[in-house]
Image (cartoon, rainbow, N blue to C red):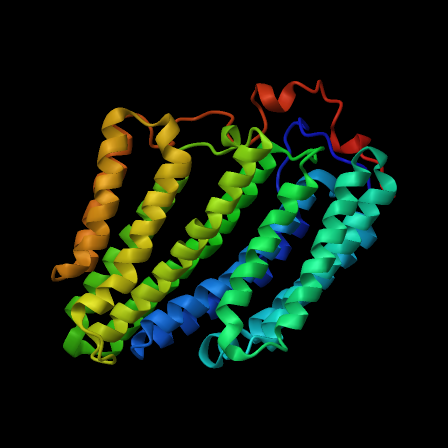
Amino acid sequence: MRPRDKHEPHRVASTLELFFDLVFVVAVSLAAQTLHHLESEQHVAVGVGAYLMVFFAIWWAWMNFTWFATAFDNDDWLYRVTTIAQMAGVLVLAAGVEAAMVHSDFTAVTWGYVIMRLAMVSQWLRAAVNSPEYRRTALRYAAGITLVQAAWLLRLLLPEETGVISFVVLAVAEVCVPIWAEHRQVTPFHNHHIAERFGLFTLVVLGEGLLGSANAIIDSLKDTEHIVSLVALAVCSLLIVAAMWWLYFATPLHSRFGTLRQSLTLGYAHYVIFAAAAAMSAGIEVLVDFHGGETELSSVEAAATLTVPVAVFVLAVWLTAVRPAATAVANTIIPLAGVAIAASALLPSAEIWTAALLVAIVATLVATGRDGTNRSGVGDGSDADSTSASGAGSADTITKE
């Protein structure tokens, strides 16, 4: 398990990484569905809090695997088996999502999470054995992850009233492990590969919104009394998801993964981006219930389950990715539109206002030439960063051990 060349040309996501993402589709879907049910049943605050806790486990396990894979993926049989073991942990976690979010029983979620993280420890130990130059970093990862996992298991023994506080403490400990481990020697992450992986997971969470749009159409076919409002919701949902996709991919992210601090900042910001995108799908489902008369939420409460996550997504993407490369006009319109999207929950037909404001954001990006179109070489490793290694890091030179 030797380190891969960070300048390797034409580096793309492997089929194993794409396969790995599929189990996270299940976990994200179950978390979004459970959030939808809790919000529709008027448990909005409790539902959002539980959702953010569960989603942290999903996001952090995925991001740690992705970070490791960009540096040490050698695709041998043992690496594949260990990755599949991590996938088993995701499925255990997914099976416990409802119990965690509805009944505050985090037993299955915790065990599934620990399975994933301990499998990751074995990967770091392999890297420590086979990559002497990164041995110290790898051993720090292994030690830090193991210690925090023991704490997660001990958390199951604590009284329920300490659940939120203990979660916050351990979540902070988790995100501090990479900072400590990489402090003296940074693992060789591949800018284009990391950017592509984050983009692929963004597509996963946005896909949940498309499911919500489809459900609005399905319900409209069954409920002719509310067919107009449900069809309008389906159209707006598609526009919302499409505009969110357009905004996210408007700016190539690979250039933002520079120093360790920049990379960690952008990576950690994706917790907000991913969680907001998946919560948006729950908001669409809540509005389907609202238009069908299946929830007692007020119009403002129901609308806020959609507008607030969308606004958070817009502001987070703008702040971390779009802002540095955008024009002054775009950097004025986009954040104002993001705030207006959140406030549109106070207006009738909030989904229409949200879709209109997002279309305005896309139009601004197009008008200012920052819409992500007509780029050559983005994401294919063809720029100077990817080719500067003169082919020394090609896949053929990677030693498998």
Q: 49 or 201, which lies in front?
A: 49
Asked if residue 80 can be seen in this view, the reply is no
Q: Quadrant of residue 235?
A: bottom left
The picture places residue 161, in percent across and down from the top left corner, at 49, 77
Asked if residue 57 can be seen in this view, the reply is yes
Q: Residue at x 63, y 56 (%)?
A: 20
* Residue 379 relative to residue 290: left or right: right
> What number of labels is visible?
0
* Residue 188 relative to residue 299: left or right: right
Q: Residue at x 59, y 71 (%)?
A: 109
The picture places residue 174, in percent across and down from the top left corner, at 61, 54
Q: Quadrant of residue 307?
A: bottom left
Quarter of the image for the C terminus: give it.
Answer: top right
The picture places residue 397, in percent across and down from the top left corner, at 81, 30
Q: Residue at x 37, y 38 (%)?
A: 319
The picture places residue 236, in percent across and down from the top left corner, at 24, 56
Quarter of the image for the N terminus: give it.
Answer: top right
Up the image or down, 73 lies above or below 97; here it is above
